[in-house]
Image (cartoon, rainbow, N blue to C red):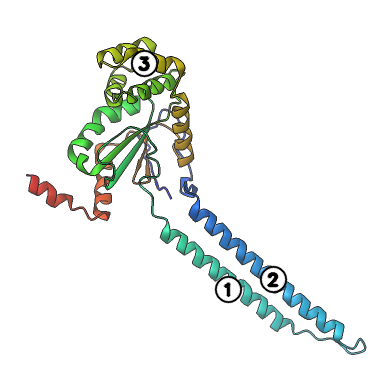
Amino acid sequence: MYTRLEHNDHPTEGRDVSTKNNEVKLDGGTKDAGASRATLNYVLIAAVFLLIGIMIGNYLWNTDKDKSVHVDEAQLRSVMLSVLEESDIARASDMALVVEDEEPDRFALVDDDPYLGEEDAPVVIVEFSDFFCSYCKRHFDQTFTPLLENYGQHIRYVYRDFARLTQESTPAAAAAQCAFAQDKFWEFREDFFNNQGSLNRDFYIQTAEAHELDVAEFTACIDEGRFVGEVELDGFDGQIAGVRGTPGFFINGQILSGAQPYVIFERMIRLELEKAGVNFENEAAADG
């Protein structure tokens, strides 16, 4: 289950960020299990009513037609209500178990995309972003660096594409993935956000030259669109998970929409560290 936190003062590039995303479960397991239990309850109810019907029919069949037939309606109603009540209790119990078991999986959205930090870090932040997004740049300028400076030892920071804003959004994202294939993604990310007005094929190749990539291989990669499919799949994954605009973040499975201030990220990170049993205050004091 993914819990949504929103901040209306920071719109996400004009997109509607409202969604009932707590109804989305990516692994599908819990939701399917709940559906199976509900189906079983309905089958049980149907079977009981069928049995009651057979009993009444059998009684009527074996009763002398000349004699009056009496069915204790109060008793029959009591049996039916009892069955329904037990079914409701069972269903409520199943729902409680589902809620209790639904702890967000912090690795659910990491995929095979670029990341910084330890692979098994206690806090996993997944950013869905677009290189043309002004609010994504705001996050990059104001929040990204201090987060890593202060909590980098506890964070795995994953970047994924939600390339929807312009016709050049997908080519830019695919170019960054071509750089990732040569271990230069984060350098390209910085250059792309710092030069949003210049993003085009010529700029991608100039950036590859500046960072001493195999330019021929890089050029072939962007011209052949090798990572366009990967970029599109990132967008689909984000949309399924509840992303409706950029930037969109998941902090240990909890969705956070928009270019939120640093203090919001810090608060969420500290809560997750507390859950993981990491005493950040003591570590900070020791480092000081």
N-term mark: 3 or 1: 1
Work out whether 31 lies above or below 92: above
Quarter occupied by residue 11: top left
The residue under label 2 is: 47
- Between 154 and 92, the one lying in front of the other is 154
Quarter of the picture containing the C terminus is: top left
Mark 3 in CB contact with mark 2 (< 8 angstroms): no
**Viewer-nearest of discs 3 and 2:** 3
**Viewer-nearest of discs 2 and 1:** 2
The numbered mark at residue 265 is none
- The spot of residue 157 in percent (x, y) is 29, 37
Cα–Cα gap, marks 3 and 1: 66 Å
Q: Residue furthest top?
A: 202
- Between 208 and 63, the one lying in front of the other is 208
**Viewer-nearest of discs 3 and 1:** 3
Work out whether 250 lies above or below 79: above
Q: Neighbour class for label 2 at 10 Å: few (<14), some, many (≥20)?
A: few
Residue 245 seen from this side: yes
The residue under label 3 is: 217
Cα–Cα gap, marks 3 and 2: 67 Å
Mark 3: secondary structure: helix
Residue 200 seen from this side: no
Instruction: Name the residue located 48 percent from the left edge and 34 percent from the top edge.
Output: 236
Cα–Cα gap, marks 2 and 1: 14 Å
Instruction: Name the residue located 35 percent from the left edge and 12 percent from the top edge.
Output: 216
Quarter occupied by residue 74: bottom right
Instruction: Name the residue located 69 percent from the left edge and 78 percent from the top edge.
Output: 77
- The spot of residue 266 in percent (x, y) is 24, 43
Mark 2 in CB contact with mark 1 (< 8 angstroms): no
Question: In the figure, is residue 177 to the left or right of 42?
Answer: left
The residue under label 1 is: 86
